Amino acid sequence: VELERRYTKDQILEFYLNSVYFGWGAYGVKAAAQEYFGKSLDELTIAESAAMFVPIRNPRVYDPRRQPENVLQRRNDVIDTMVAHDMITKSQGEAAKKEPLDIKPPSRFAGPADHVVAEVKRQLLHEPEFAFLGATTDERKVAIFGCAADDENCHGGGGLKVYVTINLDWQETANSILESWLPYTDPSTMTKQQVDACIARYNATQTAVPALERLRCAPTGAISTVDSATGAIRVMSSGLPFDVEQFDLALRSERNPGSAFKPFGLVAYLESGGSLNSFWDARSPIEIECPFSCGRDGSNIWTVRGGKKDTGIRLTQATYQSVNVVYAQVSVAVGPAHIIDVARRMGIKKSTIPEVYSIILGGGGATPIEMASAYTNFATNGLWAEPYLIERIEGSDGAVLYQHETQRMQVVDPAIIAAARRPLTKVPTGAGTAPAANIGRPQGGKTGTHQNYTDAWFVGFVPQYATAVWVGYPDFQYPMRDITIKNQYYSRVYGGTIPAPIWAEYMTDILKNVPVENFPPDPPGVNKYFVVPKTDVPLVLGMQADDAEDAVYKAHLQPVMTEVPSVEPAGIVVGQDPSPAGQDGTATQPLTVGEGTKITVEVSSGVPPSAPLVDLTGMDVDQVVAALAQFKEDTGVELSFTTIFVETTEPTLVGTVITTSPIPASTVTFGDTITLFIGKAPPPPPSGDGGGG
């Protein structure tokens, strides 16, 4: 009624035809003619004009590309109606009905930023920040679209110019790269075997199977870029065409970030007084006892894999090599509540993050926009600005109605963020997990691969921008195994195999005209986060070897396990170096060393020690006792001895060892008894009177 007061029916029809949705992202007749036929309006044939209007009724049911048979029947009905109303002749109508539909293939992205446009509309109509447009949705619609001409109580409205932060060139680059790596598969082009396999994936993940035209049977992706200095969202590219899926994967899809969440745990650990040169047990797997159910079997034992073989590692290396077992221990050390607090401060504002140990390995959720926003902190030393889309709004008269004002907040201590940045800059190198992300300028980042390869990420940053790349199935979490992407077979998809090269290709393109800059200088206090912490050496004498090894690792030290001969049972620790033990074998006072110090742990082989017998000849008994004591200290072989005195006419041999049994250099074993042959003077000759009386 309101429209009829202001406009004629022809004007209303014109407005309608210029704004109605025809499907596939086409609003208005001009856009529809280009979308379906690649023509201007005056180039359309009768058959094409009739077919183009069919989708208005229901763009999904009457989709010229997916349900051509439905459209063809309705098109012919429209042609018959045109004949009946003398709009065309009967012969023209018959000729038009014989024409094929001849719909042109779809372009992947009808508009470079359709999801962005939808989000801007949503914000203008619903976000409190734009309350100046009206207190209600209806009032905001009036402000945007205008008032009735004869409504004296309505003022202003309409003709707004809304400026957004998106860089359209970069947006189109992101769209194109996603299309080249992860092309959308139209379900209407799939074979029955492919459809059945796709439905099986929905069933395997207990996901409701949608209508055929909404099946999502291949991995897709999303790219988000945020300006580090202002928070402006420069790119928000969702891998599915807007006509196919209005849900924005870049903005709203909460997916498990895998190890890309570890930097939040790292910051929390440094805030707790930790050091990047702390030393951790990196053996895999490890079992961690939780105060709640955390195991796959419902138990309170969390089994973590992804480590090193029989070694420990410093935290800085565990970061750029993404060692899961180390970060699981970090999560226990600082607690999940602290990690969540850091993540919230840094930019993961809305996604669901459960308070469990596994969040440090990506057990919670995050959107690509949130991840990109959070990683801007590593480029700014923790000076964070909230991400935003709408830059400015002008009225029809050019007056500025709204101007975004960036407010930067120091969300983390600058020294901590600068310290955490160092290992992240090694990730896109040959030493890290994402050499494929290297673009030859100052940069950092982190890979993320969720459990069973269901989500893969690379979140990276240069001094000016941070970008998150996510890859996965859009409707469910299904393992990306044995898959071909861009004509290359992948047995498993990791953050470093697909997201990292996508990130590099995209960033290389958009930064080609952006000056190379360095990260801000390290603020005072950074070096204290690289001090090697001190720890007490545990006393492990008498322990079983496995228990001793665990005790040394628990003390953040590196055990060097060696097997030695000993009369002790096999597997018992009989020695360690360094050791806090005193002469009696018990701890006397704490022995403090730097974390990561090697502790030699000697473990009994169960075989008594043996060694070549030392040469004892020429020694007296006291000297023999001292020599055998030294022999025991040097070789571990304890001997006893017996003595046999033998006469000698050589005065220098009296009271000394002439020889031994066994002889010197013979092999003797712990507990053996040797015989010492000691010289003695012969008895004096008998005395008499020479035969006199």
Image: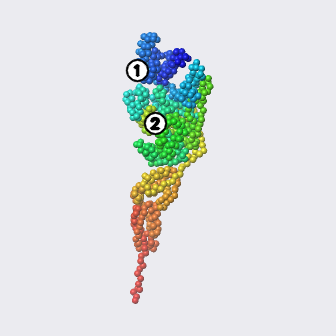
Circle 1: element type: helix
The alpha-carbon separation of the residues under discs 2 and 1 comes to: 38 Å
Q: Residue at x 56, y 46 (%)?
A: 529
Image height of 629 relative to 132, above or below: below
Kindly identify which residue carries mark 1. Answer: 69
Kindly identify which residue carries mark 2. Answer: 455
- How dense is the environment of label 1, judged by Cα within 10 Å: few (below 14), some, or many (20 and up)? some
Q: Residue at x 48, y 46 (%)?
A: 332
Q: Residue at x 45, y 13 (%)?
A: 82
Q: Earlier in the sequence, mark 2 or mark 1?
A: 1
Tell me if I can see residue 264 in this picture: no
User: Which residue occupies the extreme bottom position in the image?
Assistant: 693
Image position, residue 650 (x, y; %): 44, 73
Image height of 630 relative to 121, above or below: below
Image height of 664 relative to 419, above or below: below
- How dense is the environment of label 2, judged by Cα within 10 Å: few (below 14), some, or many (20 and up)? many
- In the displayed structure, does residue 154 sit left or right of residue 292? right
Image position, residue 184 (x, y; %): 45, 28
User: Which residue occupies the extreme front position in the image?
Assistant: 153
Tell me if I can see residue 274 in this picture: yes
Image position, residue 14 (x, y; %): 52, 17
Disc 2 marks which amino acid? Asp
Disc 1 marks which amino acid? Glu
Image position, residue 677 (x, y; %): 41, 69
Image height of 109 relative to 357, above or below: above
Q: Residue at x 50, y 41 (%)?
A: 262
